[in-house]
Image (tube, rainbow, N blue to C red):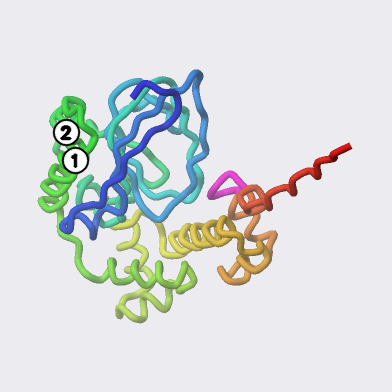
Amino acid sequence: MNALGPAMLEAAPSALLRPYVTRLCAYSERYAEPVTRSETAMPGAVLILAFGTPMEVQGQRVSAFAGGLGDRFTVTRTMGPTEGVEVFLTPFGARRLFGLPMRHLTNRVVPVGDLPGAWEDTVVGRLAGTPSWRARLALADRLLCERILSGPEVGPELPWAWARLLESGGRLSASSLAESLGWSHRHLVARFHDQIGLTPKTAARVIRFGRAARLVRAGTPIALAAAECGYYDQAHMNREFRVLGDTTPGQIRPRPEPPERARSDA
């Protein structure tokens, strides 16, 4: 694919991957000049299995890399033609796949070659040698299944707590989660650091921001979105959008189409 711009093909993860992978897509990017973006904080981790021109992420030049959860936006710069497979992971998929406590990846990216059990050469090399995007996605699915299912098992408690936090839109308190699990607050925070990389309170902020951004993007009035998502007021939501997304609600809210200018027959 030689046209300028991004191109993407998405595939649904296989049944074995679905508890661990939320999105799997092959992509290509080619631009006439470097492109800088602000990537918003999200309640998940990312794995980029790319080949081509390295990109800049937080000022670091990387090709294939892993990124953990964070409490701020991330600046990336695409420097030249690149392609590969992009994987969005649940925190628990990332914990099993990367083989690291997730606190080591908080607000960080790590080259795939630096992860335990180095697999960069086999995975990235095999993907690069697979010309069909659909075959590339099927291969990535198989390799991810093998690696994730051989990783350290995750107990049921944190996935349960994470699901409750997501269902609440980030409005469930850490104390209520700890009470439901029969844990102390300190133990809950320690487990979150290991398996998610954020404290429960910070994870709730990221989830709440994601929900608010979706509402605003869908056209919900900003003040109503702020109230529904539990922000103190609109100013509070604005501050969170700047820190977590490098934007404001007003910048992403859909604008009405301008009325067509009346044509004159004179």
In this image, 72 relative to 181: left or right?
right
Q: CA distance from mark 2 to mark 1?
A: 8 Å
Element on which disc 2 rests: helix
Q: Which mark is residue 165?
A: none
Is residue 213 visible in the rendered image? The answer is yes
- State the image quarter where residue 187 is shown: bottom left
Question: Mark 2 and 1 residues: CB-CB less than 8 Å, in contact?
Answer: yes
Where residue 38 appears, as percent x and y from the top left, is: 52, 39
Image quadrant for the N terminus?
A: top left
Closer-to-camera residue (12/206): 12
Q: Residue furthest right?
A: 266
Which residue lies at the image location 15% right of the left edge and 34% below the top edge?
Answer: 119
In this view, 102 is above or below 187: above
In this image, 143 relative to 171: left or right?
left
For badge 1, the amino acid type reads Ala
In this view, 116 is above or below 217: above
Q: Is residue 238 magenta?
A: no
Where residue 32 appears, as percent x and y from the top left, is: 49, 18
N-terminal of the two: label 2 or label 1? 2
- State the image quarter where residue 26 is shown: top left
Which residue lies at the image location 13% right of the left edge and 45% below the top edge?
Answer: 142
Where residue 237 appears, as percent x and y from the top left, is: 63, 59
Q: Given this view, does label 2 or label 1 mark the residue nearer the observer?
A: 1
Reading the image, the residue beneath label 1 is 140
Q: Main secondary structure of the magenta part?
A: helix
For badge 2, the amino acid type reads Val
Closer-to-camera residue (73/174): 73
Reading the image, the residue beneath label 2 is 123
Point out the stretch of residues depicted in magenta. Answer: 242-247
